Image (spheres, rainbow, N blue to C red):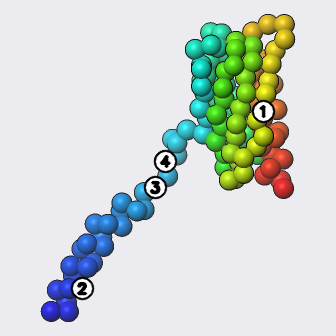
Amino acid sequence: MRGIVSGVILLVGAGVVPGYVAPVSAAAPRCHVINGAKLPPASGADLICAEIERAVAARAPRAHYTVTVTVRSPSRLSALAMVNGQPLPEQNFAVMDQELNPASVRRFAGALASEIAKVVKE
């Protein structure tokens, strides 16, 4: 009788454990852009996230982070980031004399990555 009960518990446990031990997907997005339709064509949401990924990889490769970028206008961005479980203050970026372009997006990503690196070094 004890063997049957142990076998049932083992089978039930084997069926339950995979539901709790879900692997973290390497494709889980770390960057999300809100209001991306406001962006000029040369500075799309994909470019923003790619530049953030590149800049963070260069400045803080071990950082665990997520970023939500909000496009306020074609020339203004803001970002909220969570780094190693700590929220960063809202980061704001604006271009005064033109719309966002790839160079300005790189500057925004670099500034954000520098703030992320500060948290990682603490």
Residue 107 on image: x %, y %: 81, 25
SS label for mark 4: loop
Q: Is residue 37 left or right of residue 98?
A: left
Q: Nearer the viewer, mark 1 or mark 2?
A: 1
Badge 2 amino acid = Ser
Q: Quadrant of the C terminus?
A: bottom right
Q: Nearer the viewer, mark 1 or mark 4?
A: 1
At horizontal 70% and vertical 12% (from top left) the residue drawn is 74
Q: Is residue 116 left or right of residue 53?
A: right
- N-terminal of the pair, mark 1 or mark 2, is 2
For mark 2, what is the residue?
6
Residue 63 on image: x %, y %: 71, 49
Badge 4 amino acid = Ser
At horizontal 30% and vertical 73% (from top left) the residue drawn is 13
Badge 3 amino acid = Pro
For mark 1, what is the residue?
91
